[in-house]
Structure formats: structure tokens, C-alpha cells
Image (cartoon, rainbow, N blue to C red):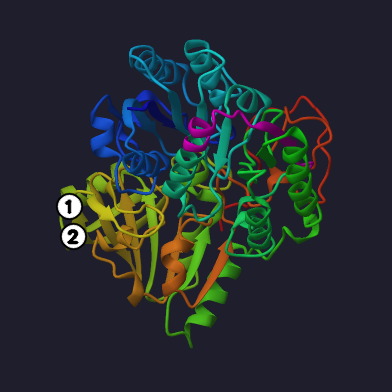
Amino acid sequence: MTRIAVGGFLHETNTFAPTKATYADFVHGGGWPAMVQGPEVLKTIRNINVGLAGFIAEADVNGWQLVPSIFAAASPSAHVTEDAYERIVKVMIDGIKNAGPIDAVYLDLHGAMVTGHLDDGEGEVLRRVREVIGKDMPLVVSLDLHANVTSAMIEHADALIAYRTYPHIDMADTGRATAQHLALMLRTKQRFAKAFRQLPFLIPLSWQCTEDQPTKGIYQKLAALANEAVPTLSYAPGFPAADFPDCGPSVFAYGKTQADADKAADAITAIIAGHEDDFDGRIYSPDEGVRYAMELAANARKPIVIADTQDNPGAGGDSDTTGMLRALVRNKATKAAIGAIYDPASAKAAHTAGVGATVTLELGGKSGIPGDAPYKETFIVEKLSDGQFVATGPYYGGRDMDMGPSACLRIGDISVVVASHKAQLADQAMYRYVGIEPTEQSILVNKSSVHFRADFGPIAERLIICAAPGAMPADSSALPWTRLRPGIRTKPNGPAFVATTKSHSPAPSPAIG
């Protein structure tokens, strides 16, 4: 029987974000499953939308025996602490060392992990794995679409295969595709030639959505280029908030010959570069966005959904800024809801007060984002929750969620989801668990950039992007870069990076209104 050692370690690092990822964050998981080790990995990571789950399903089809080490993931944030990284990687490496005879290794990684002591978290993981298994054993990896791929990652892995959808509804499918590529390698005993290209400009998150052009068309052309000579080809637009030289979009192809791999990689790279002018669109200020949403809602049959994109906890924000809430209140929005604001102290105060009580809080605003502050106001406690529910939409894909003690607070005709853990609001269940029916609202404000579209797109009359203060600027050139590779443009058609002595402090944000 073919035996495969497997594991997962995922983190998307925003080096400008306010809060680091500790070991405890990986134990909890945030919007990911909680940390599991050994045989529990296979029991827990099944039938949900993560890469390892898809690999497990395909392994079952192939009759492979899987030997799991660890699955650990945490919500995007600033750097992974050295303690967390080393403890988790030790379990993974020891699991592979002690797995007995194995035929290959598969890892579910993100591809944009920066730690307190390493720029390239995944490259170092793969180097250590390769050191254990030797140069001849197949090592394959599924990656996030937002991976900042490095030459070390390319060197140490036999194949890197990235998601092709944003919202990431194909995470499990990518794990399945990685298993299929491994099966091809095992069957043919063939090692494929590699080609790796990096693009010369960063792409802001909002314009990486695969439901819109030009990204949708790019992935259609990418899929058409795959063939027998090039069994897998990936494009990773990258995560544009990691201050190190390999940040940015990349293409990586695997071919029967080097010429095959190079030809495919060059073709898709040229297509992406040719669309540089098209990675752009309208972003509203908080007041502009709310007023426009109210205008649209007057004649809409479905909710107007606003992305609070700069405080997206899926991109390193703390999900606690108050700019969009202030704009809703200031403009007297009705039948509106916003979520989820991460504030354990306010959630606790609401639970102490009880349903129906009136509480005065300093809500949110605790992450120190320039232009933001706690919102001191009086709220009515509408509903309380222990934070346990299942997120059934296509992004989370049936994951058990734990948002901790949570509450629905009301101010005027505006409902606010307050939680004790952070995860981006990308599922309708993240309103329903505190008693808010999203389909009955006129305006929904989601702390998310793109992932929410998978579940909210079908119920939305219109989607709007707003830029209130937050840790992830919608304009990537606004970040105080210090360590990018020389000459890369900090946004499409933007200024080329030139090294300076700037600090890593967050970029200025619009002041509180």
C-alpha cells in the first residue's frame, strides 16, 4: 500500500498588521479548524473546504494510507511568533521522521507566512522536510492563491499547486488536484521540469477577485494551457502586505521538459502583464459608500452589501475598527447590520447585562489603527450567543465555528455583531448566530474583502467596496514598504519601489469623522 505523510500549517502574514500570531492562536484556529495532531487530523479535516480535506478524499479513492502529523492554522495577522512556528514545525518534522516507510509527502501550506525570525516560513518548512526525506522522494504542496512564492519553495518541492478561485471555494479541490498530480508522479516515476516567474507589480486584494475581470479571464486562459506536456500550471496573485523581497504575483509551471514548462509560464505571465491597466476599480469613503447604499436600497429587493475591506481579518486586520459603524449611524441608515466587531470586553459586558438591557460601551477601536478609536455609545442588547455554529456557505464549507461569547447590539436601526474571536464575515451564518437574518436587511457591512462574495453574492442587489481605517489598505502603494525587491511597482502602474529607511508603522488612514 502506498503510504503518504501529510500535514498542514497555514498563515497569511500581514507584516504591517497590529497583532502577531501566537501558538494559542493556532490552537484555537480562528476561522480555521482548531489545531489537531496525529490520527485526529484525519478524523477532523474531512468534508470541509481546506486543501488537506480534498487530498484525504482523493487518497481514499486511490487506496493510499495517510500518516498525519499536524494541522494548524490561524487567522491572518502580523508575524507568526518564533515560538509558535518552531513548536508546530517540530511536530510536523518529527511526524514525518517517525512515519515509518513512506512513498511521498503532501503538505497543505498557505505560501505567505512570515515569522519573527524568517521571511519565508514555507520555504524553511520545505527545506527541513527535504532534509529528512532526501532529494528523491516526491514532496507536493497545495498553496493559497495569495501565496508569495519564493525560489526556495520552488526548489524544495516537486510541485506547488495553488487555488484558482477568490473567494477560495476550491481549497479542497486544490488538495484533490495535488493528490492527482502526485498519483501521476508515482505512476510514471517522472519528475517534472519547473518554471518560475515573478511579476513586476503588486495587485491589491480587491482586484484579485476571480469573479471579475481581468482575473476571471486570466484563470480561464490558465486552465486552457494545461495539457499532457504541462500537467499543472499555477498563478498566485500574491498577498500584497508582506514586506520582504518575494512579495508579489508569480507563475509556476511543471512540464515534461524544461521547454514545455517555460513556454507555459511565459505565456500566462505575458497575459497577466498585459492586463496591468485593468487591475483597478471604484472604492468609496465610508460616508460615500453608506449614502450610495442607502440610495440603492430605496428601490432594491435584496440587501446592498458593503465590504469593509481595510479591516478585513482575513488580511491581517483585527476586525475592530469603527469607521463603517460611525458612517452608518451618522447617515441614519435603516435596516442595516455590520459584523463582526472583535471586542471580547464588550461581548462580556453584553452577557453580563443580559438581553433587553441598555449598555454604554467603548466598542472596538482597540487595535491602535491610525484614524480609529473605540466608539463610545449606548446600545441595546438584542441577543446573546456562545459563538458556536456551523458556517455552511461555500467559503467556510461546513466548518464548525467558535466566535466565543457574542452578542447582537442595536443602535437606532443598526444591528452590530460583536464577537470574542475574529474571523472574516464570509458566511450568512455569521449574522444568523446572533439572531440577524441577513436577507431581511437593507444594508450589510461585512469585514471582508472578497471571500464574502461566495455566500453573499447570490443574496445581494449590489456589492460596494469601502475604505475605512484598517490594517490592509485597499491601495497597496499606501503601505510603508522598506524591503521589497528593487524596482517592483507597489501597485499596477504605480511607483517603483526604492529602498528607504522608513519604519514599519502602519500607513496613515482617514481620520475619524
Q: Secondary structure at mark 2?
A: loop
**C-alpha span from label 1 to label 2:** 6 Å
Give residue 424's mark.
none
Q: Quadrant of residue 265?
A: top right
Residue drawn at x 61%, y 28% is 191
| Quadrant for the C terminus in the image | bottom right
Front residue of 509 and 48: 48
Q: Where does the image place residue 270, in percent across and percent down from the top left? A: 80, 50
Q: Where does the image place residue 335, in percent across and percent down from the top left? A: 37, 75
Q: Are marks 1 and 2 in contact (CB under 8 Å)?
A: yes
Residue 472 in view: yes
Q: Is residue 424 magenta?
A: no
Q: Secondary structure at mark 1?
A: helix
Q: Quadrant of residue 14?
A: top right
Q: Amino acid at mark 1?
A: Ala
449 relative position to 272: left or right: left
* Range of residues picked out in magenta: 183-201
Residue drawn at x 27%, y 59% is 408
Residue underneath mark 1: 353
Give residue 357's mark.
2
| Quadrant for the N terminus in the image | top left
Please say if 129 is above or below 414. Answer: above
